[in-house]
Image (cartoon, rainbow, N blue to C red):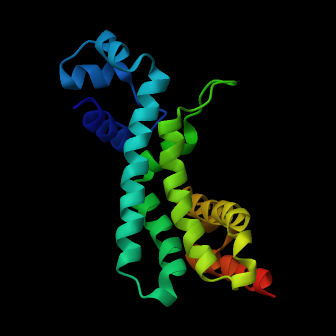
């Protein structure tokens, strides 16, 4: 109940306006109860962001299962944009929230991030030459950063200011160029 309502509030108002006090009020608990259950606001945010990550992974898997093999990487890029646009506030909260310096995310959270990343690695490896597939993890990190940048610039309207009419097409092009270069 806490995570469902917390995720709903985050999706509604975004990270900057998220309030544990408001969450507690919505579910009829005291804010102290939230801290007793999660230990801190940081742990509560990790749990809520974990819900977003689970939803993102599920969305990505569903989209990929429906895609023809030759379109899976392009589908993964489209799914990245789609999920971010459909879940703007919750998606951006993953990147807006930061743990204090020196505090690492728990393994359970890291596994949720890795689960999405692992899907991307598989899709990139599938389009690499067999003798280049060992490069998939490093390439996936770079390509994910590129797609993320294109997506984020789309969401915050930076691409509109820069005159980019097709950010998704530009993301496809950058990924294709990188894959092509790696396969040479």
Q: Nearer the viewer, residue 129 or 177?
A: 129
Residue 178 image point, x, y percent = 74, 78
Query: As drawn, which residue projects farthest toward the front?
Result: 131
Residue 41: image location, x then y, percent? 45, 21
Position of 49 relative to 91 (above/below)? above
Q: Residue at x 49, y 33 (%)?
A: 16
| Image quarter in which the N terminus is found | top left
- On the question of residue 169 being in view, the answer is yes
Q: Measured along the vertical axis of the image, is residue 43 above or below residue 120? A: above
Judge whether 105 appears above or below 127 on screen: above
At a point 37% along the width and 22% down the height, the residue shown is: 20
Residue 24 position, x and y percent, is 27, 20
Q: Quadrant of the C terminus?
A: bottom right
Q: Is residue 67 left or right of residue 166?
A: left
Q: Residue at x 49, y 81 (%)?
A: 72
Please tell me which residue lies in front, 98 or 134.
Answer: 134
Q: Residue furthest left?
A: 28
Q: Position of residue 76 (x, y in %)?
A: 50, 72
Q: How many marks?
A: 0
| Side (left or right) of 86 relative to 72 | left
* Residue 101, image quadrant: top right
Q: Is residue 3 left or right of residue 46?
A: left
User: Quadrant location of residue 55?
Assistant: bottom left
Residue 165 appears in view: no
Residue in front for this viewpoint, 23 or 60: 60
Q: Quadrant of residue 57?
A: bottom left
């Amino acid at each position: 109940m806490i995570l469902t309502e917390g995720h709903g509030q985050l999706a509604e108002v975004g990270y900057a306006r998220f309030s544990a006090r408001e969450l507690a009020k919505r579910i009829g608990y005291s804010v102290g109860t939230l801290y007793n259950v999660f230990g801190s606001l940081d742990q509560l945010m990790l749990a809520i962001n974990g819900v977003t990550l689970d939803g993102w992974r599920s969305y990505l898997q569903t989209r990929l299962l429906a895609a023809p093999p030759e379109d899976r990487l392009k589908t993964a890029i489209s799914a990245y944009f789609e999920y971010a646009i459909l879940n703007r506030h919750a998606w951006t909260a993953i990147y807006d929230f930061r743990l204090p310096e020196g505090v690492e995310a728990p393994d359970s959270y890291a596994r949720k991030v890795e689960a999405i990343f692992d899907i991307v690695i598989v899709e990139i490896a599938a389009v690499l030459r067999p003798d280049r597939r060992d490069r998939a993890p490093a390439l996936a990190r770079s390509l994910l950063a590129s797609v993320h940048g294109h997506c984020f610039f789309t969401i915050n309207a930076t691409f509109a200011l820069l005159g980019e009419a097709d950010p998704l097409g530009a993301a496809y092009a950058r990924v294709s160029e990188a894959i092509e270069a790696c396969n040479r």
